Amino acid sequence: MSDTFIYTTPLDPRAKPLIDELIFEYDSRYGNYFSDEGAAAELNRYPAEAFAPPHGNFVLLVRNGETIGGGAFKHYDDRTAEFKRIWTRSDLRRQGLARKVLLELEAQAARQGYSRIYLTTGFRQPEAVGLYLGNGYTALFDVEADPEIYRTLPFEKDITHLVASLALLAEPPPSQPQPVSHP
């Protein structure tokens, strides 16, 4: 069982089954709560170019040739990437795949120069809330309140430490001290 990340575009045919499943899941959880057009309108709100380098990115998690998860980010502000559409195939949940995607997106956002992550999730997605809280994200809402009063639940995370560690990896190793000979 080999999991691989592939950076591509939301228009990649390998993404379609997961995006279709995501639309179905959002529609089943929210119906037309957010929009009369349903989840498809929300997922098509941003052009594919918004999730392309240099300001964004789109990743698929592939296992043995099958797409099993994915996620994306886009430019929010000069230091902040906004994560969108982190999902895993419904029949493969509870295996840590969403966390894998989340950590990969964080690393890629850092590689692209972002030092902060911003994201939102819906109030009927307690699994996502648990994922973000369990991975160092700060809730920008009162977690004790009924989440439905907020509709969408915003989170943030500082990833400056990732940017710094990537910079260290990019630096050439210090040269070895040369022995000094004395006459």
Image (cartoon, rainbow, N blue to C red):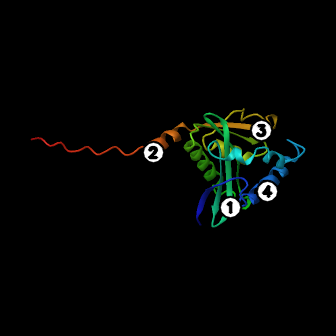
Q: Which residue is mark 1?
A: 67
Image quarter in which the C terminus is found: top left
Check disc 3 and give the amino acid type: Thr
The mark that comes first in sequence, 3 or 4, is 4
Circle 3/circle 4 CB separation < 8 Å: no
Circle 1/circle 4 CB separation < 8 Å: no
Circle 1/circle 2 CB separation < 8 Å: no
Q: Which residue is drawn at the image coordinates 63% and 46% (left, top)?
A: 53
The mark that comes first in sequence, 4 or 2, is 4
Q: Along the horizontal axis of the image, is 159 left or right of 11?
A: left
Q: Secondary structure at mark 2?
A: helix
Residue 178 image position (x, y, % from top left): 23, 44
Q: Which residue is mark 2?
A: 170
Q: Quadrant of the rendered structure where residue 67 is?
A: bottom right
- CA neighbours of label 1 inside 10 A, class few (<14), some (14 to 19), many (20+): many
Is residue 29 visible from the viewing direction of this image?
A: no
Q: Which residue is mark 3?
A: 152
Marks 3 and 1, Cα distance to the nearest angstrom?
27 Å
Check disc 4 and give the amino acid type: Asp
Q: Secondary structure at mark 4?
A: helix
Residue 15 image position (x, y, % from top left): 72, 57
Q: Which residue is mark 4?
A: 20
Marks 2 and 3, Cα distance to the nearest angstrom?
38 Å
